[in-house]
Amino acid sequence: MDLDPHLEENRANWDSRVPVHLGPNGYRIERYHQDPQRVSETVTFDKPLLGDITGLSVVHLQCHIGTDTVSLARLGPSEVVGVDFSAPALEAARSLAADVGANATFVLSDVYNAAEAVGREFDVVYTSVGTIGWFPDMDRWAANVAALLRPGGRLVFRDIHPAAWPYEEVDGEVVNLYWYWPRDEPLVIEDETSYLGSGEVESPRANEFVHPVSEVLNALIGAGLRLDRVEEHPGCDWAQFPTQSVQVGDQWFFPDHLRDKVPFMWSIVATKPE
């Protein structure tokens, strides 16, 4: 894979997150060994939009170490193929799937070349949480999504809402730190920690890209997909703000002064016309 320098840095960053996510306080993959019915929080959140995938073929873009891919495989599809640009992540994903007997295979590719790398069409393309901010070109992404879908197949997508993306916790306060509209250069992040795990990331530099609502939707429309459903969610399935997130039931929300004022997540279901 030949990637531009920004995406090469991102790949190195994600390569170095793998041992952190596999270590203490990480993804706790032992739970998938201990409980053959376990489904990740991410896939559980998305099940209402996924619907019944029994007997369907599913491709999971940006699958990382495979916990969500294994979770999808436990929902009864005919097959699940995970795609990611990190070789260490896919090594961990293959190991997990083999250890727990999941019907899942994995392909090494970035999202811009996923359709060519996988080489066939699916009933469902699934991608969820923390995905599209790592690359700049939504049109190329949407074109690959469309190419991966058979006629009548559908995309199920969820990510941080673009209106929530600018918020960060700084010194115990949630503040609007970044911008909503894209800029010529990405936001450069240098962080030796990750969102899970207690170890240090060896390649801490990463580049994040802003994608407003209109850009994402227009990319999918431009790729020939039909928008079936767009949802906005007030909560999410993890504590985005380490000390300030408010938990209600099994969901996490903005702190009270922002709760119900800012959408937290959003979801899209789009279909490739027959």
Image (cartoon, helix red, strand yellow):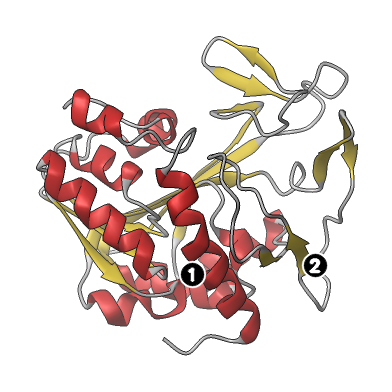
Dot 2 or dot 1: first in sequence order is 1
Residue at 83% from the left image edge and 72% from the top image edge? 183
Q: Viewer-proximal residue, 145 or 100?
A: 100
Q: Amino acid at mark 1?
A: Ala
* Residue occupying the far bottom of the picture: 2
Location of mark 1 (residue): 142
Q: Amino acid at mark 2?
A: Pro
* Residue occupying the far top of the picture: 249
> Residue 187: image x %, image y %?
78, 65
Disc 2 is placed on an element classified as: loop
Q: In the picture, residue 18 is in which quadrant?
A: bottom left
Can you say whether 44 is above or below 91 in the image? above
Q: In the picture, residue 154 is in which quadrant?
A: bottom left
Residue at 60% from the left image edge and 42% from the top image edge? 195
Disc 1 is placed on an element classified as: helix
> Residue 159: image x %, image y %?
57, 46
| 260 on left or right of 109 | right
Distance (Cα) linking label 2 and label 1: 18 Å
